[in-house]
Amino acid sequence: MMTLLIDNSPVLIPLIFLATALLIPVVAAKRKTLAWPLAFWATIAVVAVSIFNVRRVICDGPVHYRLGNWAPPIGIEYVLDHLSAFVILVINSVALLVLLHAKKVVARELPHKRVPYYAAVILMLCGFNGIVITGDLFNLYVFLEISALSLYGLIAAGEKQSPVAAFRYLIMGTIAASFYLLGVGFLYMETGSLNMADVKAILPTVIDQPAILVALVLMVLGMGIKMALFPMHGWLPDAYTYAPTTSSAIIAPTGTKVGAYVMLRVMFFVFGVNFVSKTLPLTQIISWLSAIAIIYGSVLAIAQKEMKRMLAYSSVAQIGYIGLGIGLANPMALIGALFHVLNHAFMKACLFLVAGNFRYKLGHSNVSRLTDAVRKKMPWTMAAFTVAALSMVGLPPLSGFFSKLFLILGAYENSAWYFIVIIFISSLLNAVYFFRILEKVYMRPRIPVPGQEEETDVKRDEVSASMLLPTLILAAGLIIFGILNAFIVKGIINFMIPAGM
């Protein structure tokens, strides 16, 4: 039995999620309280398999799994290498912590939608994991659509404005998927294959064909929309702001990272480093769009009064860091991008959970209404916020500092001093919109604010352990990743650098 599980470990992850997504509506139809335990324990099982898969890849090297025992390129192949195993573990670990936090929040915000909501969350995770693990370009599109359909529902279940935000994302997501599918069609037309490894081997013989260039541009454009790369980010702010708390906390750290993963995988592992960086100016375009996103998102985040919307625009900037690492196309920059995938997943999940804690206890997450009473009512929540905020700014020894450091080294390697300046400016801008919250919460105003009652005797009123624990674990992770940055880079991320870079 154990041998069977080990041999089939790559396929277990999407299979567990798919089976659970189908099981939740059936089992929890009459007892709605069963929906959360099913989703939570399925995610625990997947995290355990993900940890095993990372260990397996580190010890034994890449794992190739043939579905139905059909050999590629005819059959569909799942591939576990250092990159896919790493991204899968990040996605599922963050999802597990958010689901632990979600029990009470979803029961309050969506009391009559719990069953379909948890089913949609698990189906979305099935899609995300399938996208990352598949080695087939068309199978990737299938999982892309599975995750997208779930995402639309998870966003639309929120506030009054959420259906409009979901519809906008539906339009943009459909365009993105169409671009990607058209690119796959052009690629198949020239290579006759959909298997990523097989396409990579055939490409040198047809690389001069115009259809190959069109395929690459369409696929990158589609993934640019999915990862909300500037100026294709228009769907993101409203989606993150008006979605339910749990949706924002799980989509923001994972959804855009999957789009970034596909872009990285297609550009560097299918088409090759030389073609996308030397034959075409594609990497230069991505790096400049990312640099604009870093400044644009940071400036607009400063202008926001609602914390969730501030974090949404902050995500536009943080995605820019990942895009910049991809665009610079050198080992140091790519290490920075991949490390930031991990860091941003934990930072943004922690910050959105803090916003959820505020809404649960205070009834709002409006920055202008926060006072020094919050640190007395919710000291541990504020401690987690402080750690995540300082990591976003990039203060050592927190993990956010090290991903920015590697990006700076990558820019220096390309003699792109202007990107170094942009990273420094963005860190200052990050400090502005995070420090204004820290100032309001940790420093009592000398002059009373009109219309705001001064609270002299404030009792502690922290959220429950099930909501506080995941928030603190995410914050602690940022400290641990910062301390262990050398081990993470040397032991895992170094093996993700594509050949020829």
Image (tube, helix red, strand yellow):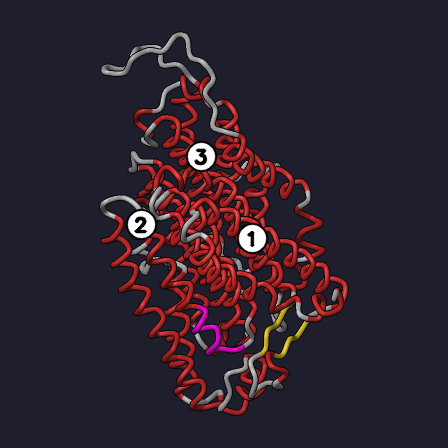
| Tag 2–tag 1 contact (CB < 8 Å) | no
Residue 431, above or below 273: above
Membership of 309 in magenta stretch: no
Judged from the image, the secondary structure of the residue bearing numbered disc 1 is helix
Residue 2 as seen in the image, left or right of residue 198: right
**Residue pictured at 45% horizontal, 87% vertical:** 188
Q: Quadrant of residue 6?
A: bottom right
User: Label 2: which residue?
Assistant: 157
Question: Sequence-wise, which precedes: disc 2 or disc 1?
Answer: 1
Q: Please provide percent x and percent y for residue 187.
A: 44, 84
Q: Which residues are magenta?
A: 136-143
Three-letter code, disc 3: Val
Which badge, 2 or 3, comes first in the chain's sequence? 2
Judging from the image, what secondary structure is the residue with disc 2 in?
A: loop
Residue 374 versus residue 189: which sits nearer the camera? Answer: 374
The kind of residue tagged 2 is Ala
